[in-house]
Amino acid sequence: MRYRAADNYGTRGQVIRGIVTWSGMAVLGVVACVLSQPRASGMMHPPSPEVVHLTGTIRDFEKTHVDFNVVPSGGYGHYAMNVAFDLGVEDRPTFRGTGFRVDTQWRDTVSNPIAPHLYGGGVGLVRVANTPTFENQPVVDTFDSSEGPYDPDTAGPAPTFYVGAEMPTVDEPTGLPPLVDQLVYDANHGTTTIANDIHCNKFLVSNHHTILIDGNVTILCEQEFKFQNHAHLELLPGATLTLYTKGVLTIQDQVDMNMNTADPSRFVIYNLGTEPVILQNQVEGYATVVSPNAQMLVQDGSDFYGTFTGQSLHVKNQGGFHLDGAMPFDECGVQLNDTMGAAGIPSTGGVSSAATYDEWYRDVLGTNLSIPHTIDLVWNGTFYEFASNDFYPIDGQLFGNEGDTHNNYFTFTFTAYFIYEACDDQFFEFMGSDDAWLFIDQSLAIDLGGIIPSTDQHVDLDRLGLVDGESYAMQFFYAHRNPTQAIFRVRTNVPLIGTEAESVNAGFD
């Protein structure tokens, strides 16, 4: 199996366009935060160097630009999920535009505010291409399979659905036995043990028949896979089943699948076709389902326990979707006991379109003017810091102040490199009065969109799936779009290595 764009689909995610939370209702509002004190760093002495010079590029815009000097549709505040998880063309953010206003920030174990998609290290997320639907008394919640089977009395909160996720590309398995036309297992109350791989057109089980899986088995069905009428699927100790289907995939009429292990990771379904994955009429099953081109339907008293990535999800008629939230640990084995935030009203955060956003971080003659700019992060005995409550670096320059006290409308971006030191509590924090996005290894790590009142966010590098001792790029994108505040504060304990500014166009107009 291979994935596009990101190399760790489980924790990094792909391109997203929005968020749906199954939480009844959200209370509108915004929380203004101050930078929290970071955890004690593993570095107990000043690093070398004691001052980090970060040179980047400032691009100035006229106040008449459609994205500047505006009020977002949801009002001033923090907006998230309006840019893709991964950097796009020319290593710049890609605007998706169906994010939301953040009513309450998501927080990590020690209460630092974090980007919503990093909640639980990526656990508790369902990546779907299209908006899921729920109707007629569905049950949607989370559980931890590492603690045993699903228990409604200890179930966790509803998962978060990331709408617009880029779907993985799944390859068919190779090296399977010759194709057989049809396998039918319908002897009433009979049992069949399968210990070898299968390639068939149809795989049909019914009439209380039990299929036992012995060993690591792969099945590829070209046309139809169907379990029905009280059929059972059980995995013997140590066994796994990986199922690939290209046609109809229906599980119905009081069937149970993998209930004996209660481990979704041992039964993996890859739906390669466009037919939906259907669980209906009191079906129960533990599985991991990947369906890039089709939805999954859970209905009529059926219960699905596991993980799902696919086009969409439809849960109805007292159906249950119970997301497995196991593995809530960072790279150092520390359990992630995060606090879920609250998503407010959908909004682009005051950005007109992907086309206008595309002008923010590249030179566009006649639209912006650019010059290099350097900020100095100074080691204070605990971390590096640059702090300004009056970040107006281009007053009287480029397009000028346009009748204002300051030049208020500009973007600033820089790239730096660092060596990741696992389990050394490396972190990066930013507080600002406007948009800021941080990408580490080209994946979104801080998501502070919108015109925001002194809002901050923190990222613990141990949550990002990085490799100890490897070098990574940290790319930062900022925009100042309001005429009243100019807060810009960076804190990190990572000794960064700055790079040169991009080419500039200040000599042109």
Image: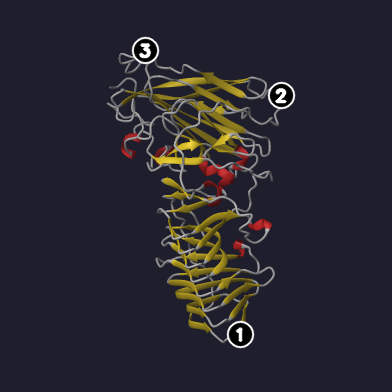
Left or right: residue 327 versus residue 254 is right
Direction right: furthest residue: 44
| x, y percent for residue 17 | 41, 46
Is 355 in front, or is 349? Answer: 349
Circle 1 SS class: loop
Residues at badges 2 and 3 in contact (C-beta under 8 Å)? no
Circle 3 SS class: loop
In the picture of the structure, the residue carrying the numbered disc 2 is 45
Mark nearer the viewer, 2 or 3: 3
Q: Is residue 124 above or below residue 247?
A: above
Q: Quadrant of the C terminus?
A: top left
| For marks 2 and 1 on the same chain, the one whose residue lies earlier in the sequence | 2
Mark nearer the viewer, 2 or 1: 1
Asked whether the viewer can see residue 15, the reply is: no
| x, y percent for residue 9 | 52, 51
Label number found at residue 405: 3
| For marks 3 and 1 on the same chain, the one whose residue lies earlier in the sequence | 1
Residues at badges 2 and 1 in contact (C-beta under 8 Å)? no
| x, y percent for residue 409 | 36, 23
Among the 4 quarters of the image, the one containing residue 101? top left
The CA distance from mark 2 to mark 3 is 42 Å
The three-letter code of the residue at mark 2 reads His
Asked whether the viewer can see residue 471, the reply is: yes
Q: Callout 3 environment at 10 Å: few (<14), some (14 to 19), or many (20+)? A: few
Label number found at residue 75: none
Residue, x 58% and y 76% (percent of image)?
Answer: 232
In the picture of the structure, the residue carrying the numbered disc 1 is 190
| For marks 2 and 3 on the same chain, the one whose residue lies earlier in the sequence | 2
